[in-house]
Image (cartoon, grey):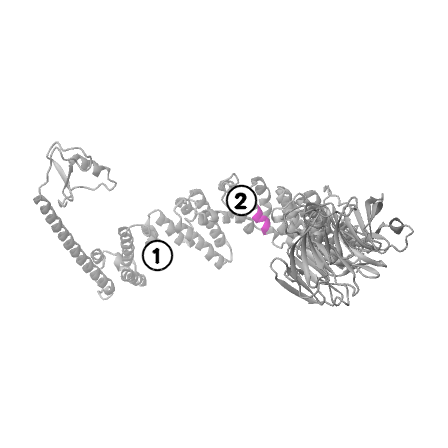
Amino acid sequence: MSVKAFELVPAVERDLLMGDKARINIECIECCGKHLYMGTNDCFIHHFLLDEVTSSKGKLSYSAQKLLHKYMGLKKPVAELRAASALERLIVLCDGIVFLVDMVTLETVPSAAGGGAKIRGVTAFCINENPVNGDPFCVEMGVLSSKRRTVQIYMVYEDRVQLVKEVTTPEQPCAVSLDGYFLCLALATQYMILNYNTGASQDLFPYNSEERRPIVKRIGREEFLLAAPGGLGMFANAEGVSQRAPVNWSESVIGAAVCFPYVVALDESFITIHSMLDQQLKQTLSFRDGHIMQDFEGKVILASTKAVYVLVPLPLERQIQDLLASHRVEEALVLTEGAQQNIPKDKFQVILHKRILQQAGFIQFGQLQFLEAKEHFRKGQLDVRELISLYPLLLPASSSFTRCHPPLHEFADLNHLAQGDQEKVLRCKKFLITYLGEVRSTEVANGCREDVDTALLKLYAEQDHDSLLDLLASENACLLADSVPWLEKYHKYFALGLLYHYNRQDSAALQLWIRVVDGDLQDSTRSDLYEYIVDFLCCCSNLDLVWKYADWALKKDPTIGVHIFTKRPTSKDHSELNPNDVITYLGKHSQALLLYLEHLVLERRTQKERFHTHLAVLYLERVLSLLSESPTDEDQLTRARAKLQALLRESNLYRVQCLLGKMENCEQLLLERATLHGKLEEHDKALHILVHKLADFPSAEAFCMWASSCRDSAYRQQLFHLLLGVYLDGNQTATGGNSGVLEMAAVDLLNRHGEVFDAVRVLRMLPEGWSLQLLRPFLGRAIRANMHACRTSQIALGLAHSENLQLLHDRLKERKKPIFVSEKKGCHLCHNTFSEPDVVCLPGGVPVHTHCVAQRVRDSPTKRQLTNSSNHT
C-alpha cells in the first residue's frame, strides 16, 4: 500500500549546467551545506549555491546559483568528489589520481614540502565518517588501489596525504565503505567485513560483481547497506550480523540511500522507497536516465546525465496523518514508533505521539476493535471526555469540556458512528461502561471525576447494570442535578435514594424509599427494601429522622420495625437513644414494646427495676389474657408461662409484691406465686403451695435447688430440711392415699439428696414406725459420708500435729544459736544501729528492730499475725 513520503524537486536545470554544450554529462556530485559540486565528463568541476525556497502554500523548491567552474586539466571525466569541510578541501578522483582542490577557488592544492598531495593508481575511495583519529583537522580515507588486492588507509591534511595502513584482501575489491576500524568491501565474488586494526575479517554473502554493480553504503554507526543477489537490500553490522529484515528492491539497482525510516533505491527507470520498519514498498517515483544517488546529511540528491534533483521528504506528521485518514492504523503506528529518533523527544512525546495514538484509538473504536482502541487511549492519555462526548447527553450540563481541535475523529456522535445499527450502539455503550469503570480511579480521571462518574451512573441506569449500586454505595462524584432525572427516568428509585444519602439528604432518600414500599413508585431493585429502611434508621445518626419514620416502620411490621431500637449500634456521639424515651414512644405499639423490653432485660442485661417490672407485668398480662380466652390456646399459654416463669426465676430486680398482688386470686398461676414467695424468702409458703396445692414434688425439689443456688451449703440444707418437714407434717395430717404419697415423696427426697441433709437431725424427725429398709440408700450414704469426714479430720489433725512439731524443732534450733547485737551493727530493715538488746531475729539469723518488724506487718496487705493461740511461729 502506497504512501506519499517524498517529492522529487529539481535543483539544477540542464541549461544552468551546460548551456548549449550537449555533450557534457554529470559524472559525480557532492553537497556540503548549501554548496553543490558536480564533476563532469569534460574534466570540469562546477560549483553551485542551492537555496531552499518555501511558497505561501508550504511547497518547497530550490534556487540554484552558479558560482564557479574549473577545468582540472586531465582530459578525463571527474569520477568522484568528496568534501572535507574542516580542511576547506575537495578530494577529487580523476584519471586514477586522487588530489586536493580548494573548495572556494577550485584551484588544485600544491604538494607540501614534507610530502605529496596526490595518490596515484586509485580505482575508488571513501571517507571515514566515524574517524578513529582525534585530530579535527585531518580526514581519514580508505583507498582501493589498482595494485591487486590491497586497501590503503590515508590521513588527508590541508596540503598533503599520508599513508598509515595497508591491508591485503583475498580478492581484488571493487567497492569500499569505512566506519571506524571496519572496512566493508565488495570483492569480485563476495562481500566481507574487515577490521584493518586487528586484521580480523568476516565473510558476508556471495555476490558476482561482473553481473551487477555492487553497492556498499554506510547507513549508521558500524552498519552498512549492501546490494545482495535476488534483488535484496541487505543490512549488516560490524560483526557481520543483520539486525534488520532485508528490503526487496529491483534487480537492477544502481544506487541506494537511507533517509530514516526509509530506504531509497534508484534503478534505470524508477525511484523506489521501502520502509525499514515493515520492509514494505511505500512509494514509487518515475525517474529516467538516473545514474547517481547520494545522501548528504539526510538530504537525498539524484542526478541524471544532464540535471540534478533533490528528493524532499514530507514531514512525518503529514505522512502519519495521511495513513490515519486512510484508516491504515497499524502502518501509522509503526511509522510513529520508528520515527521517534527523528523527531525532538519532548515534542514527540507530549504532542505528536499522544495525538496519533488517540486518533488510532478512535479509528479502531469506530471499527468496534475495542481492546485495541482501549490500549491506544491508555497509551495516548486520552482525555476521557473526548470519548464520553460521543454519547449524547452523557456529559453533565454543567461540564465545561469542548472537543479537541483539530478533531481526533470524524464522528459527530454515537448515532452517526452506528448509522442506526442498535447492536453497534449497545456494544459501544458496553465498552464505555468497562472503560470508565477502569479509569475512574486512575490519573486519567483527574480533573474530570464528576463528568466520568455522572456518565457512568447514566450508563449503569440505562443498561440496568448491577454495578450501579456499587458506584453509589462507594465514594463517587456523581452530580445530583444531572443524575436525579436520569434515575427517575429508568425507575431506579433505590439507587436515587443512595445518591441522596451520599449527598447528606437522608430525609429525601427515606421519603423516596417509603413511597416504593407503599407501592406509590415501582422499583424492583430490592425486594427487601422495607428491611433495608429499618436497617438504615437503625444506623442513622439523625435522631429526628429516626423518631419521624419509626412510626411508619412499626405500623408496617412491629416485629421488624422494633429493630430500629434493638439493633442500634452503641455510639459515643449524641446519636444514642434514651431507653425511657423509647419505651414512652412505643407505648402505642404493644408488641414492639414487649420486644424492646426483652432486648433491654434479657439481651443487654440492663439492671433497672423499672424495666424488669414492666416486662414482668407485660408477661403476666399476656398470660392472664390467654387464660381469659375461650377456648384457651394451650400452646401459646405454655410458651407465655414459660417466659414469665423464667423471668421470675432469673431476675432479682422486679417488684415482687406488685406481681403477687396482680396474681393473688388466680389459682392457675400457683407455680408463679410459689416463685414469688421464694423471692421474698417466704419458703414455707412457696413449699406449701408446691406440695399441698399443686402436689408437684419435682417442682418442690427444683425450688429448693433454685432458691439456694447462690447460697452456701448450710442454707441449702435448711431448705431441704424445711421441705422434708412439710412432707412429714403433711403426712401426719393427711388421710388415706395422700398420707402414702407424702411418705413416699419424703423417702425419695432423702434417697435422692441424702448428701444435703444432716443425718442425725433427719433421724430425729422421722416417725418411729418407718422401716429402715426404705431409708437404706440414705443411711448408707450418710454413714459413708460421716466416716469419710471423720477420717479426713484425723488426717488433718495428724498433719497439723506434725507441722507443729517441726516448727518447735526449728524454734529450738534457732534459740541455740547466738545472735550478736552491737552499736556498730545496723538493722536490716531501717539500716540504723541498735541502741538496746531487744531485737527480732528474721530467718537466717538476721537481727532487726522490734518496731521495724511491727511497722512491716502493719503495712503488709495480708495483715499477718506474729503469734496465734497455738503459739506457732
Q: Does the magenta run of residues contain 532?
A: yes
Q: Could you say where residue 20 lies in the image, as x and y percent from the top left?
A: 92, 51
Q: Does the magenta run of residues contain 647?
A: no
Question: What's the amino acid at mark 2?
Answer: Leu
Classify the position of the N terminus by image quarter.
bottom right
Residue ranking furthest to the front: 113
Estimate how packed mark 1 is, as few (under 14), some (14 to 19) or many (20 or more) residues with alpha carbons within 10 Å. few
Tell me which secondary structure the magenta stretch mostly adopts.
helix
Q: Secondary structure at mark 1?
A: helix
Q: Observer-nearest residue: 142 or 822?
A: 142
Q: Observer-nearest residue: 147 or 323?
A: 147
Q: Which residue bears the numbered disc 1? A: 702
Q: Could you say where residue 830 lies in the image, as x and y percent from the top left?
A: 20, 35
| Residue 636 visible, this orientation | yes
Q: Quadrant of residue 482?
A: top right
Q: Which residue bears the numbered disc 2? A: 586
Residue extent of the magenta highlight: 531-536
